Amino acid sequence: MALFTIQVEEKAKLTQVTLSGVVDETADFAPLAELTGAVEIHCGDVRRLNSMGVRLWSDAMRALTQHADVAFVACSRAVVHQISMIGGFLGKGRVASFHAPMRCEVCDYEADHFIDADAYVASGRMPPLACPNGHGPMVLDEIEDIYLQFLST
Ligand SMILES: [Zn+2]
């Protein structure tokens, strides 16, 4: 059981929120309700969302981004999928960075690649990641246009 947890930490100039686990009908987003100012939501450890979880998440983010300036950091593959599929999944928030699942076409080695959204948009391509077994650059284990669609909207 990977329970959903929310950690809220007040830093000097921003509030840092860390979400992790599985987002389902039991997910309680109440800790986000009163946040204002700059908010960074780290969601690299969000592993899975079911349909009720997606609804609770979307409602919470829509409400939060009415009164806070929200950046989503290190979005996991599960989160990126929802951003692409569900309009308004992040409310008015923006993606600062995300994970890209990479795979070597020769040996099937898999790795998680951390991508800065602004850098990707500026360069128009993913920074290369070499297979540690010496097979050259790995490829995105997703359809790039679909996986990264949220960056072009
Ligand atoms: Zn390889």
Image: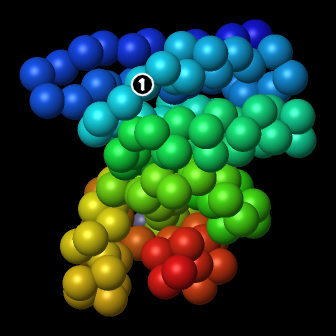
124 in relation to 8, above or below: below
- What residue would you read off at disc 1? 35
Q: Does the beta carbon at disc 1 come under 8 Å from ligand 1?
A: no
Q: Position of residue 131 (x, y in %)?
A: 34, 64
Displayed quadrant of residue 126: bottom left
| Numbered disc 1: secondary structure | loop
Viewer-proximal residue among 63 and 152: 63
- Is 39 on the left-hand or right-hand side of 105? left
Displayed quadrant of residue 8: top left
46 in relation to 144, above or below: above
Residue located 45% across and 39% down the image: 67
- Is 139 on the left-hand or right-hand side of 46? left
Determine if residue 99 is in view.
no
Residue located 76% across and 11% down the image: 1
Determine if residue 53 is in view.
yes
- Is 52 on the left-hand or right-hand side of 129? right
Q: Give amino acid for label 1.
A: Leu
